[in-house]
Image (spheres, grey):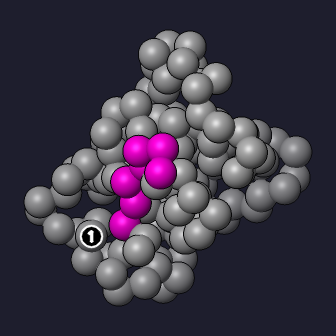
Amino acid sequence: MKILIDTQIILWILTDGKKLKQNEIDIINSPDNEIICSSISIFEISLKYSIGKLELKNFTPEMIPELLQNNGYRIKNVGFEVFSSFYNLPNDIHKDPFDRILIWESIKNDFTIMTRDTKILEYKKHGLKTVLK
């Protein structure tokens, strides 16, 4: 299964793996799953770091792609297909632009998203697949 992990999961992987739940660890470590990190998550981390909303210890945003790839995660660039069709995602459910792009990227690419944001579950009726029940 192709699993797109959200920004918070990426941060926990990089900074404090103890915050991950056992089922998340099992999914991430399963050889049956391809773990995907969106370039939009890397941008979100870099943006929040630059304006002081996020503190990182022992690494900077520039180091994130290499750290992720060295751990076997695939980084997927958000393509024009996602951006140009983004208007199709209903905007009455979730307002965070980064989460909305991850949701639409998941739907468009037939990824399953890993997040703890339960509000995202409301997009299942629009084709979103999630590891949350």
Q: Which residue is mark 1?
A: 27
* Camera-side residue of 4 and 120: 120
Q: Residue at x 51, y 36 (%)?
A: 104
Residue 60: percent from left, percent from top: 63, 48
Q: Position of residue 92 (x, y in %)?
A: 74, 45
Position of 8 with respect to 91 (left or right) is left
Residue 47 in sight here: yes
Name the residue: 37% across, 66% down.
131
The answer to whether residue 15 is above or below residue 69 is below
Q: Residue furthest right?
A: 51
Q: In the image, is residue 34 above or below residue 23?
A: above
Question: x, y (%) of residue 68?
Answer: 39, 50
Residue that sits furthest to the left in the current view: 32
Identify the residue at horizontal 87%, vertical 52% (top origin). 52
The magenta region covers 125-131
Q: Residues within 10 Å of mark 1 (few under 14, many from 20)?
A: some
Q: Is residue 44 visible?
A: no
Quadrant of the image occupied by residue 24: bottom left
User: Between 19 and 119, which is closer to the camera in this rendering?
Assistant: 119
Give residue 66's quadrant in the image.
top left
Name the kind of residue labelled 1 in the image.
Ile
Nearer to the camera, 38 or 112 = 112
Relative horizontal placement of residue 62, taking residue 21 as reference (left or right)? right
Residue 132 falls in image quadrant: bottom left
